[in-house]
C-alpha cells in the first residue's frame, strides 16, 4: 500500500487507475486524496463521483448511445486528472 | 541525453505498433519522467484509457496520436525546465511527507474475562491495544470466542472482570457507558434489515450522532460516493445483494465519522472480487491522514486478512494464543512450511521428495503441506519439484502466515 503521506505516489496511483480505465477506483481514491490533502475540494470530488455513477447507471439501463457514453467517460476521466493536478498544486501549505 | 531519449522513443514506438496497450503504458511512464509539461502525460493517459474500448480502426488513430505525444516529449525536452519542475514537485512532497499519520490509542483492554458456566467456556484476553490508522485481524477456529470478544469491546455484552479504556474518546474516564457505546461503530455478522429508504437510514444515523442540516447531507453524500453506493440508493434493503448490504452497513458505521470500527466476519458472504474491494476500502479509509480509523475485524479468510492487517490476534478456545504485528509473524519460527497443490498420491510425492531435505509431509484433503528446516526456501522446493517434472498447480509459503496455527498438531 502506498504510504498515506506519499502525495506523489498517491497521485500516480490515481493516474494509473485512469490509464487502466479503472474509473471506479480512480474516483474513490481521488476522494481520499482531496480529503487528506486539500479538504476544500472534497465537494468537487464527490460531485465528480456522482456524475461518474450517473454515467454507469445510464450505461446499465442502456439509455444513452455508446458514442455518447464514450465521450462522457472521457470527460469524466479528464476532470479526474484536472482535479487531481489542481489539488496537488493547492496542497502545498502557504 | 537527447540521443538516449530518441533511442528510448524508438523502442516505445516499436512496442506501440506491436502491442498498443503495452506501448501506451511505456509512453505514460516516459512522459511522466521526461516531460516538464504534465499535460503530455495526461493526454497519454486519456488515450491509453480509450485504447481499451477502441475497435481496430479507432486503435490505429489512437496509436498515431500516442506517437505524436512521444515525439513531443523529445522535441520539448529541456533538462533545466525538467529539473525545476521535479524540484517543485519534490518540495511539495517533502513538506507533506512530514505529516505523520496519527496512531492515537483508541481502545485498551486489560485482563478481560467472560465465563459461561453452563458450557464451561471462558474467554480470556490479557491485553489488547487498538490504534488509529491500524487494522487488527482476529482469526481462529469456529466457536473460539471471537464474537463474544467483539460484543464485549463494542459494549453489547458486559465482561465478568477486566478493564476497557477508550483514551481517545474518554481520557478522564468521565463518559457513561451509553455515551461511549455511541462512539463505537459495530458491524455484526448478521446484518439487521433496514426499513424505509437506504438514504433516509443513513441520514438518520448521521443525525442521531449530532450531524444535522447541510452537514448531514454532505456527510451522507460523501460516504455514499466514497463506497460506490450511488447506483443503489433507490433500492430497498431486500433488493440489495449480500455484498451491497455489507457496504451499506459500512456506510452507516462510517457516516458519522467513527474512529473505532469493529467488523464481525465482514467477508463471510462476499464474492472474491467484493472481498478485495471491501478490504481495499477499509485499508485506505483506516489509514487516512485526516480521518484515520482503528479497525478490528474477524475473518476466516486468512490470506486476505493477513494482506491488510497490521496486527494479528489468534484465538483458540477462548484464549488469545498470539498477538503481534503482522510483520513479525513467524519471526521466531524454527522451520518453514509450504502448501502445495500437486496431483500426486502420498507415495508418489514422497518419492519425489526422498532426496529433498524435508521434515514432514501431510495432506489436508485438498493440498499438501511440506515442512522443512529454515535453511530450505520455497524456491528450493519449487525448483526441486519442477526439475523432476512435477506440475505444481498451487504454491504458498506459510512460514509467516497465521495459517500454521491451524496445523500445530502436525508440526
Image (cartoon, coloured by chain):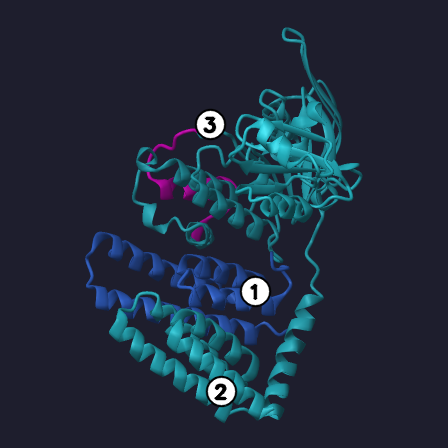
Chain colours: A blue, B cyan
Q: Is residue B196 magenta?
A: yes
Q: Quadrant of the C terminus of chain B?
A: top right
The answer to whether dots 3 and 2 both sit on one chain is: yes
Which chain contains the residue that carries disc 3? B
Residue B111 % position (x, y): 77, 25
Q: Which residues are magenta?
A: B192-213
Which numbered circle lies on residue B190?
A: 3
Which chain contains the residue that carries disc 2? B
Separation (CA) of disc 3 from disc 1 = 35 Å
Name the residue nearer the viewer: B342 or A47: B342
Q: Mark yes or no: residue B259 visible.
A: no
Q: Quadrant of the N terminus of chain B?
A: bottom right
| Mark 3 or 2, closer to the camera | 2
- Mark 1: secondary structure: helix
The answer to whether dots 3 and 1 both sit on one chain is: no
Separation (CA) of disc 3 from disc 2 = 56 Å
Residue B283 drawn above or below residue B92: above
- Mark 2: secondary structure: helix
Count numbered badges in the picture.
3
| Mark 3 or 1, closer to the camera | 1
Q: Label 1 belongs to which residue?
A: A10
Which numbered circle lies on residue A81?
A: none
Mark 3 or 2, nearer chain start: 2
- Mark 3: secondary structure: loop
Q: Label 2 belongs to which residue?
A: B73
Q: Residues within 10 Å of mark 2 (few under 14, many from 20)?
A: many
Residue B56 % position (x, y): 27, 71
Q: Is B242 placed left or right of B208 in the picture?
A: left
Amino acid at each position: 500500500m502506498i504510504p498515506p503521506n506519499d502525495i506523489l505516489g498517491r497521485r500516480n496511483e490515481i493516474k494509473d487507475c485512469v490509464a487502466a480505465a479503472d474509473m471506479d477506483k480512480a474516483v474513490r481514491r481521488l476522494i481520499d486524496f482531496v480529503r487528506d490533502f486539500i479538504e476544500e475540494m472534497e465537494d468537487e470530488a464527490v460531485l465528480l463521483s456522482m456524475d461518474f455513477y450517473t454515467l454507469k447507471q445510464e450505461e446499465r439501463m442502456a439509455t444513452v448511445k455508446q458514442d455518447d457514453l464514450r465521450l462522457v467517460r472521457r470527460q469524466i476521466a479528464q476532470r479526474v486528472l484536472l482535479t487531481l493536478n489542481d489539488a496537488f498544486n493547492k496542497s502545498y501549505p502557504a | 541525453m537527447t540521443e538516449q531519449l530518441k533511442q528510448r522513443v524508438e523502442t516505445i514506438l516499436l512496442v506501440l505498433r506491436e502491442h498498443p496497450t503495452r506501448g501506451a503504458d511505456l509512453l505514460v511512464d516516459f512522459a511522466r519522467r521526461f516531460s516538464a509539461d504534465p499535460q503530455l502525460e495526461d493526454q497519454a493517459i486519456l488515450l491509453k484509457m480509450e485504447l481499451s474500448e477502441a475497435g481496430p480502426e479507432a486503435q490505429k488513430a489512437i496509436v498515431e496520436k500516442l506517437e505524436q505525444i512521444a515525439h513531443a516529449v523529445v522535441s520539448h525536452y529541456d533538462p533545466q525546465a525538467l529539473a525545476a519542475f521535479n524540484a517543485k514537485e519534490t518540495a511539495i512532497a517533502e513538506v507533506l511527507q512530514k505529516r505523520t499519520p496519527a496512531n492515537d490509542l483508541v481502545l485498551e483492554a486489560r485482563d478481560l474475562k467472560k465465563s459461561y458456566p453452563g458450557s464451561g467456556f471462558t474467554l480470556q484476553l490479557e491485553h489488547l491495544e487498538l490504534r488509529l490508522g491500524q487494522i487488527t485481524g482476529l482469526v481462529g477456529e469456529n466457536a473460539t470466542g471471537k464474537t463474544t470478544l467483539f460484543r464485549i469491546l463494542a459494549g453489547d455484552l458486559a465482561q465478568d472482570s477486566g478493564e476497557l479504556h477508550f483514551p481517545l474518546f474518554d481520557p478522564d474516564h468521565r463518559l457513561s457507558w451509553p455515551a461511549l457505546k455511541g462512539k463505537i461503530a459495530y458491524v455484526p455478522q448478521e446484518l439487521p434489515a433496514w426499513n424505509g429508504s437506504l438514504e433516509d437510514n443513513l441520514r438518520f444515523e448521521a443525525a442521531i450522532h449530532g450531524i444535522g442540516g447541510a452537514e448531514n447531507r454532505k456527510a451522507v453524500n460523501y460516504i455514499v460516493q466514497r463506497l460506490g453506493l450511488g447506483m443503489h440508493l433507490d433500492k430497498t434493503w431486500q433488493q440489495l445483494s449480500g455484498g451491497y448490504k455489507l457496504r451499506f452497513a459500512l456506510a452507516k458505521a462510517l457516516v458519522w465519522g467513527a474512529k473505532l470500527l469493529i467488523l464481525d466476519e465482514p467477508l463471510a458472504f462476499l464474492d472474491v472480487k467484493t472481498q478485495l474491494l471491501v478490504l481495499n476500502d477499509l485499508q485506505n479509509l483506516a489509514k487516512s491522514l485526516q480521518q484515520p480509523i482503528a479497525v478490528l475485524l474477524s475473518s476466516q479468510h486468512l490470506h486476505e486478512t493477513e494482506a491488510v492487517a497490521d496486527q494479528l490476534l489468534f484465538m483458540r478456545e477462548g484464549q488469545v494464543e498470539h498477538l503481534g504485528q503482522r510483520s513479525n509473524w513467524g519471526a521466531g519460527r524454527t522451520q518453514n512450511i509450504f502448501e502445495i497443490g500437486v496431483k500426486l498420491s502420498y507415495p508418489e510425492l514422497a518419492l519425489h521428495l526422498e532426496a529433498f531435505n524435508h521434515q514432514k509431509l501431510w495432506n489436508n484433503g485438498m493440498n499438501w503441506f511440506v515442512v522443512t528446516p529454515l535453511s530450505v526456501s520455497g524456491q528450493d522446493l519449487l525448483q526441486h519439484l519442477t526439475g523432476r517434472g512435477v506440475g505444481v498447480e498451487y504454491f504458498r509459503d506459510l512460514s509467516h502466515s497465521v495459517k500454521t496455527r491451524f496445523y500445530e498438531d502436525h508440526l
